[in-house]
Amino acid sequence: MAELKEADAAQLHQEDVDIKRGDGDGDAPSVGDQAAEQAVKTEAAADSDAKPSTTTPERHVSIQTIVEGLEVLVDLNGAGRKSCPLCPEEKFKACYSHKLRRHLQNLHWKVYVEFEGQRMCICHLPCRNLKPSLSGDQASGRHVAHYHCVVCSVTIARKTDMVSHLKRHVNKGETEASYSGSSDVPFEEPAPSGQAYEIMKELGTNVQLLPNHTTPQKSDTYFNRKMKTNRQLVFCALAVLAEERNPLECLDAFGATGIMGLQWAKHLRNAVKVTITDISDTCIKMIKENCELNHIRVDGGSRGSRGPRGPDGAGSEVEGAPIATVEVVKMDANVTMHLWPFDYIHLDPFGTAVNYLDAAFRNVRNLGIISVTSTDTGSLYSKAPNVTLRHYGCHIVRTEYYRELAARMVVATMARAAARCNKGIEVLLAVALEHFVLVVVRVLRGPTQADESAKKLRKLVHCQWCEERVFLKQGNMVDDTLPCNCHGSLPGKTAVQLGPLWSGPLFNTGFLRRMLSAAVQHSMDDIQALVKNLICESDCTTLKSLVHGPSSLTNQVECGVVIKTLQSGEESGPAEQSGKRKTGEESGNVVKRMKSDGSLDHPPFYYSIHRHSIRGMNMPKLNKFLQYLTEAGFRVSRTHFDPTGVRTDATLEQFKSVLTKYSVPTNTNATTTQTSVSTENTL
């Protein structure tokens, strides 16, 4: 009896599909059609024999694997107007093929929810009850757009609710679709935990991802493919530190899938001792599975003189010799950083990292490195000033240099957190790319270094009319600070105080050159061009030869500390060991030399050439304009913060004067063209 019902259901579904394709022309079915129907019945009977305990309903037409699956529902190659298979007639009237194809792609397919290769497109058919009106009359309501679950066939209106619904299926181990029929896209092999995953490879490291890994608020094992540049920059910073001391104890405080810590362990091997922590049980389980996938031994117990770290003490060995060892700990990041010291700490929470800075600076070793990735662009880019004041203690407004403003604000917050622990910082790298801000600092222990860092926290005076800006020195009046005359020539006050912000340099040229060497050594082609641009920006020059010239082999000096590079071993004596502080007269000479070279630091902020363009004038090309500024005697370079930005030590008035000098009136080309045309006609 059950087999007959399944066969009848398959036949009815086939007839419905034929009707929607426009095949119901009233002709008698051919022999081929009868054979196809008989094959469908045979497949349905075979499925029912394989699973006699469950009945599998048919897949809804809104669930497809490719966009062409929606187009197959309607004969788009035929002539005449056609109706949408996922919209009622009163919502979307019949139209021609080109408009219907655009409708299917931009409305239904664009907002799909993916699960195991199946795309659940949004459906507007009357599958759900009508939404009642305010008067309670259901008949006068409207249909609600919804999704059909690929597992249990339930209808859910919101996309986020559908993602949460699928997550509950995954947690229960219900990952097999309840409908009958084969899929065009093969399913991935299920993980040992019963959860479906996909394998992703980055920098030679394999990680398995859950289907909802792209939704950070709904997924524990969040993974963002666009953060590849961030991960490579952090890796190069760690590789540079590994050249100074060996072995390093480094911490990935927010493991998620464990991709970053696994890359450290797989490529740096014995030079690092990697610890990956996360508070989620799902993440810890996924990290351990990814370790086995990359032939890395998981160590959840004690290391060295440390005590056991809770219930995860049992280690697991993979088949064969492991290439590295990673310690995986289920613990809060603040607790981990308070309990054990580290040489390198990376913080990459979802949003701001201000809640973890105190613990990071409390127990980091001297001359260690802390890298922070902040993704709360709403507060960093002055879209939520109340959140900015609450998290960072800064007042900012939207400016043309808002990206560098965000980077300096994060550095200032880190400097205050370090000063509370009697430590100072030296900024090695600060970038703002896409949707994140990455800051890498070296920690210098001692109250003297803390005082030096605190002195670099200053208010910024910004003119809201002409975008001129200058850091406010101690004891200066606000009205006499800005070089522009906007406050005197315009009614009212135009200057505002922003910050406090970090007023020191954002880059260390020696560290960036060593990062470039690490990127070349580990074949990171994606960030080599970026690091080269950062080197030029740190030197405030457009000369690319400085990146690979003889100056790249010099030692790196950071706050009286000489860091030996790989090529400088012959020049440095035994007293200049890597990571050792210089003492006595040599250290004093280094500090004096750094103070004398303070004017050579890269100028703060930048000017956008389009923001200060002159109306009715054609600006010169950006590279030509950089050459003109250099010929005028100014230091100049491009900046990664803004593709149209120019970093220079010239004031805004000098910047505009050079721009005006080499700009050409707009009607010059038109006049010249008309003159040449009239001359040709005369001849």
Image (cartoon, grey):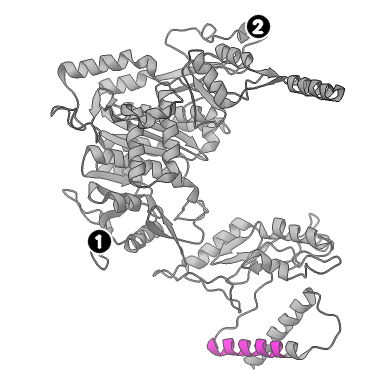
The overriding secondary structure of the stretch rendered in magenta is: helix
CA–CA distance in space, label 2 to label 1: 72 Å
The residue under label 1 is 322
Q: Position of residue 380 (x, y in %)?
A: 51, 33
Q: Secondary structure at mark 2?
A: helix
- Residues shaded magenta: 35-53
Please determine whether, in this image, residue 412 is positioned above or below residue 243.
Answer: above
Q: Quadrant of the N terminus?
A: bottom right
Q: Position of 531 compared to 481: left or right?
A: left
Q: Position of residue 145 (x, y in %)?
A: 71, 60
x 37%, y 53%: residue: 258
Which one is in front, 534 or 494?
534
Q: Tell whether position 52 is magenta.
A: yes
x 38%, y 17%: residue: 600
Which tag is nearer the camera, tag 2 or tag 1?
1
x 26%, y 14%: residue: 592
Residue 114 location, quadrant = bottom right
Q: Position of residue 370 (x, y in %)?
A: 33, 37
**Where residue 489 is drawn, which disc sits there?**
2
Please determine whether, in this image, residue 137 is positioned above or below residue 486.
Answer: below
Is residue 420 in view from this perspective? no
Kindly identify the amino acid type of the residue bearing the numbered disc 1: Pro
Is residue 394 in view from this perspective? yes
Q: Position of 629 compared to 359: left or right?
A: right
Q: Tell whether position 538 is magenta.
A: no
Is disc 2 surrounded by few (<14), some (14 to 19) or many (20+) residues within 10 Å?
few
